[in-house]
Amino acid sequence: MGHGGHDHGHGHGGHSGHANGAGADGRRLTIALVITAAVLVSGALGAWITGSLSLLADLGHQVTDVAALVTAVVAARLAQRPPSARRTFGLGRSEVLGAAVNALALLAVTVWVAVEAVERLFAVSPPDIPGTTLLVFGAIGLVGNLVSLAVLSGGSGSMNVRGAALHVLGDALGSVAVMLAAGVLLLTGWPYADVVASLVIVAILVPRTVSLLRATAHVLLEGAPPGVDVEEVRAALLEVPGVREVHDLHVWVISDRVPAASAHLVVADDATPHCEGRVDGGGVLDRAALALRDRFGLEHSTLQIETAEHADHEEHCAPPPVPRSARSATSAGNT
């Protein structure tokens, strides 16, 4: 029929590179998990001794941090598994799922802390918090969190690591807020410093958590990679010599580190198969795959060559509508 499914520009080492990155991330996440677990024990002791809401807020974050890091470690291990007959893309998306779960957990904790802080603000009598003890436990938590952040900062920057690092960052900010609250208590005796500190933690964390949730949802909903304009990809393919039409173009991310593309390319008559079965369109495929790789970083591309006759018998996905502003600009240019 003059068309064939070709898997050009895959960079078959792509999954190997992804697995190696996930393996290194797994080791870093494990180290951060051990450190965070130690900080959790310290924070639990401090919250029990002092009754501090900011320490309790920090403790809540630490509990979700341990759970988040466990989730992240498991996800990083799963991402190293090779593709199988049932899961042909492998389990790379487990890292994205882990990041989404962690973000949801952190959002739930911050909402709970905010509600508790408001209740304490309007309580009949303010809480009695020992400033010195609060300062000591805040300092212990800060040191542990900074070490964990330093470990995670050397990772690949995947959503999985970013989600875990966001939890640890929340703890570090919480520890700073705890120490500031302790300082205010020691210097002024103002009883609401601890409550205000917990609200500051919430205000800092919520936007970052929502941003991570949006990023993970974009990946899970097969959104285009950040910075890649699908219409620019279409235009680049149309510039390839021999390509007359592009349809069924899809650009998405398998995981946040593995972008992919697929398309059907309708080629000119002189790039069709001969009776010997050879496909002269191979040059078209190579040039198209090279354009996708070099211009857009799309290492994983699946391109199908078609004749115009075959394309006429297919049901094509309609391209996205052109924005009204673009249509107006085109009309003005034509006039």
Image (cartoon, rainbow, N blue to C red):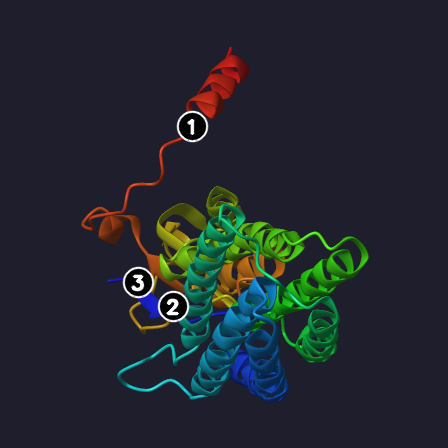
Q: How crowded is the residue under tag 2: few (<14 C-alpha within 10 Å), some, or many (20+)?
A: some
| Distance (Cα) linking label 1 and label 3 | 33 Å
N-term mark: 1 or 2: 2
User: At which x and y percent is residue 102?
Assistant: 46, 69
Q: Mark 2 = which residue?
A: 279
User: At which x and y percent is residue 34?
Assistant: 60, 89
What amino acid is found at the position of numbered circle 1 in the picture?
A: Pro
Q: Mark 1 = which residue?
A: 323
Seen at 26% across and 50% down, the residue is 311
| Numbered badge on residue 18 | none
User: At which x and y percent is residue 140?
Assistant: 72, 79
Figure quadrant of the N terminus:
bottom left
What amino acid is found at the position of numbered circle 3 in the picture?
A: His
Look at the picture and state if 321 lies above or below 68. Answer: above
User: At which x and y percent is residue 20?
Assistant: 58, 86
* Nearest-to-viewer mark from 3 and 2: 3
Seen at 45% across and 85% down, the residue is 74
Kind of element beneath mark 3? loop
> Residue 262 occupies which quadrant of the picture?
bottom left
Residue 65 can be seen, yes or no: yes
Residue 158 can be seen, yes or no: no
